[in-house]
Image (spheres, rainbow, N blue to C red):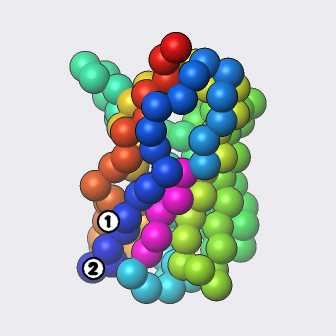
Amino acid sequence: QVQLVESGGGLVQPGGSLRLSCAASRSIDDFYAMGWYRQAPGKQREKIARITPGGRATYGDSMKERFTISRDSAKNTLYLQMNALRPEDTAVYYCNADEARLTSWGQGTQVTVSS
């Protein structure tokens, strides 16, 4: 099982930007896809974006406007660039990785958007 470690979260003012990172313990080219999800208090976990080893990205509803997923195979790292952040983006952000019969999740990183 792969270990995934998210970082880059924190407190940011409305309108600000953050870039989240997800470092994998082995080659991210091993996975069918990797993705970013988030979960706000009292809400279900929702998809932000997913990306394949070939770089094909898909986004959840309304996510593509302000969020960009990317990957760096050389660093075994997945990224999420978040712009024009809003208070409703406050959540714990998770990355995951899909491989045969197994989906692995990181522990999450907190993003708080507040003035």
Q: Which amino acid is tagged 2?
A: Gln
**Residue at coordinates 55% horizontally, 71% vertically from top-left?**
77
Nearest to the observer: residue 16 or residue 58: 16
Q: Which amino acid is tagged 1?
A: Ser
Residue 61 colored in magenta in the image: no
Q: Secondary structure at mark 1?
A: strand
Nearest to the observer: residue 74 or residue 102: 74
Q: Is residue 51 left or right of residue 45?
A: right
- Please identify the quarter of the rendering in which residue 62 is found: top right
Q: Is residue 97 left or right of residue 65?
A: left
Q: How far is mark 1 from mark 2, CA to CA?
A: 7 Å
Near mark 2 (Cα within 10 A), the count class, few <14, some 14-19 or many ≥20, is few
Q: Decide: marks 1, 2 in contact (CB < 8 A)?
A: yes
Nearest to the observer: residue 93 or residue 49: 93
- Which comes before the other along the chain, label 1 or label 2? 2
**Residue at coordinates 32% horizontally, 74% vertically from top-left?**
3
Q: Position of residue 64 (x, y in %)?
A: 71, 36
Residue annotated with mark 1: 104
Residue annotated with mark 2: 1
Q: Is residue 80 left or right of residue 35?
A: right
Can you say whether 28 is above or below 46 in the image? Answer: below
The residue segment tinted magenta is: 20-24
